[in-house]
Image: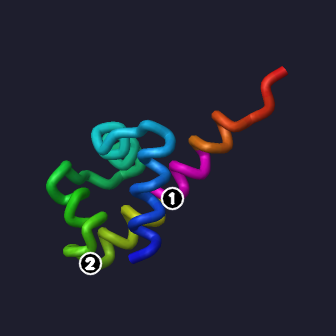
Amino acid sequence: MPERANIRSRLKKNNLTHVWLINQLRENGIVTDKSELSSVFAGTRNGMKVDAILKITNDLLDKYEAAFSAPKS
């Protein structure tokens, strides 16, 4: 559960919406919607798809944060 809270916090910190995440997940082969995504982050859904959503979301946020925290010259 802390992983899910961490993802919610990172999305908020970076001002990223669920719509942004849904589109990014779709580009990575996972089709989902707002309702399913909310259930994933609330912890009411489990399974292989949820595991994939959490892993890919963490990877996406890592890449996003690395790109936007790069030193400015």
For the record, the magenta segment spans: 57-63
As displayed, is residue 64 above or below residue 52? above
Task: Specify the label residue 58 is tagged with.
Answer: 1
Our reading of the magenta stretch's main secondary structure is: helix
As displayed, is residue 65 above or below residue 48? above
User: In this figure, which residue is indicated by the disc labeled 2?
Assistant: 46
As displayed, is residue 67 above or below residue 22? above
Q: Amino acid at mark 2?
A: Asn
Residue drawn at 22 percent across, 58 percent down:
38
Give the residue furthest to the top: 73
Q: Position of residue 7 (x, y in %)?
A: 44, 59
Q: Residues within 10 Å of mark 2 (few under 14, many from 20)?
A: few
Rounded to the nearest angstrom, the CA distance separating label 1 from label 2 is 17 Å
Q: Position of residue 66 (x, y in %)?
A: 67, 43
Compared across the picture, whether 34 is left or right of 4 comes to: left
Q: Position of residue 21 (x, y in %)?
A: 36, 45
Image quarter (top left, top right, bottom left or bottom right) of the C terminus: top right
Compared across the picture, whether 30 is left or right of 44 comes to: right
Residue drawn at 19 percent across, 50 percent down:
33
Between 27 and 19, the one lying in front of the other is 19
How many numbered discs sit on the rendered protein? 2
Q: Quadrant of residue 9?
A: bottom left
Q: Secondary structure at mark 1?
A: helix
As displayed, is residue 41 above or below residue 22? below
Image quarter (top left, top right, bottom left or bottom right) of the N terminus: bottom left
Q: Amino acid at mark 1?
A: Asn
Q: Quadrant of residue 23?
A: top left
Residue drawn at 32 percent across, 70 percent down:
50
Q: Is residue 47 magenta?
A: no
Task: Specify the label residue 47 is tagged with.
Answer: none
For marks 1 and 2 on the same chain, the one whose residue lies earlier in the sequence = 2
